[in-house]
Amino acid sequence: MSETPEPARDPKLLDKVINLCKRRGFVFQSSEIYGGFGSTYDYGPYGALMLNNVKAAWWRSMVQLRPDVVGLDAAILMAPQVWDASGHLASFTDPLVDCRECKERFREDLLPESGACPHCGAKGSMTEARHFNLMFKTFVGPVEDDASVAYLRPETAQGIFVNFKNVQGAARMKPPFGIAQVGKAFRNEITPQRFVFRTREFEQMELEFFVPPDEGMKWWEYWCAERLQWYVDLGIDESRLRLRQHDADELSHYSAGTADVEYLYPWGWGELEGIANRTDYDLTQHMERSGEDLTYFDQETDTRYVPHVIEPSAGATRSMIAFLMDAYDEEEVRGEKRTLLHLDPRLAPVKVAVLPLSRNEQLIPTAAEIGEMLRPHFMIDEDSAGSIGRRYRRQDEIGTPLCVTIDFDTLDDRAVTIRDRDSMGQERIPIDKLVTYLTERLPT
Ligand SMILES: [Zn+2]
């Protein structure tokens, strides 16, 4: 698909990451005790922390640090007319074909060019394509009839578009400005695949950035660069990131330009985030169907217009797993294998581990006292079971940037040893300066 030379990746990386995710409580298969439920996943203690950190980093960069963006949290259920206006009812479909020989089902657009069945190899065995809508349908109220049909939102974007007037007026925003939202979306994918990369229930981090019509392309280019850089700033190796512009035949019906931020997954390049120029498509559609005026009147230029929209749309769970894969590393230390996650401290589920050198009864009260002191400031782990080397390895494996060790000298000098995850370097810090020291080492 691409001419870009691909840096070598460990072919076992995906299995190793899936294994680590389950063993250490990042990601579990949903409903596992019932044999698992197709393509849905649950986030365990460390996974929930890390996923929250990914979303918080996005929110900080997109809302908190910007004077021109405000947030929104819209409902998952919306009036069905929304999906009619947005075009999802008519055209949010996948073309499905069945193999007459082996009865397997495929997406027509993903079949090999030869047309041969990817499962049994039969040629010319596919049925005509049927169009299958990807929206999950449900019913509101006690009666299951056509009048009570509702859909689980397939994207968070429409919640933003239908609130354009509310937000613009309430927050007194003037284009160019954006509305950001993080939330769940649902797509009844026929071919979910590859761990959490494509799942039926997922979490989006979307910005709709409203601009004057003649500034569309300028802002689209701005957001392409900005969003690529976000992943770099949070530690993904630049050689495994690229921006790929969609060809004309890939573009959605509403889009004047789309580029994907792609990551080099163990199975090849794949989308992390799409940045689309949606033009005035969505607001115009909602204006026509709802009868509400969604134009903006610019008093300075005395002009009225329908804003154009630039949409950087990222997947939270997909990003989390890319950060995890990129951070995964194995080293040899004094003849022993060390598995570690070089996670940016902002993404690491646990920031500081508090480890007494041993379970000696003299050390435990001081370790507890330090735990108490740090807990309001940082997400910490406390662990006293097993050798100290083994406990360091357990923290390395979940990406904890710093460990605080309480030893017998601590009882005399009221100081502790700080051990760095990446360099394994150690430093002695007085307990009364510990919070200040750790705060400097762990940026928000
Ligand atoms: Zn077949």
Image: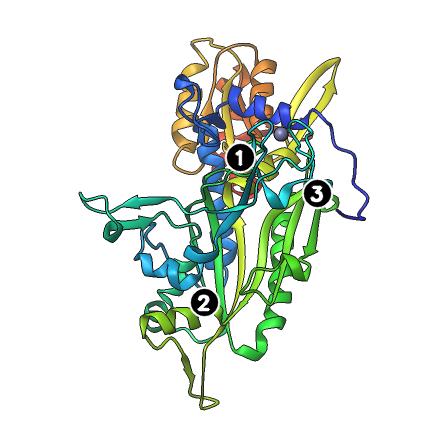
Residue located farthest toward the left when viewing the structure as drawn = 142
Q: Residues within 10 Å of mark 2 (few under 14, many from 20)?
A: many
Q: Earlier in the sequence, mark 1 or mark 2?
A: 1
Q: Which mark is residue 237?
A: 3
Q: Residue at position x 67%, y 37% from top?
A: 124
Which tag is nearer the camera, tag 3 or tag 1?
Answer: 1
Quadrant for residue 188, please give it.
top left
CA gap between label 1 and label 2 equals 29 Å
Q: Earlier in the sequence, mark 2 or mark 3?
A: 3
Residue in the foreground of this view, choosing between 361 and 186: 186
Amino acid at pointer 3: Asp
Q: Residue at position x 48%, y 56% from top?
A: 91
Amino acid at pointer 2: Asp
Secondary structure beneath disc 1?
loop
From what the image shows, is residue 16 above or below residue 334?
below
Q: Which residue in the structure is indicated by mark 1?
A: 196
Q: Position of residue 338 (x, y in %)?
A: 67, 20
Residue located farthest toward the bottom when viewing the structure as drawn = 302
Q: Residues within 10 Å of mark 1 (few under 14, many from 20)?
A: many
Secondary structure beneath disc 2?
helix
Residue in the foreground of this view, choosing between 203 and 236: 203
Q: Position of residue 439 (x, y in %)?
A: 51, 41
Q: Which residue in the structure is indicated by mark 2?
A: 282
Q: Which mark is residue 229?
A: none
Q: Earlier in the sequence, mark 3 or mark 1?
A: 1
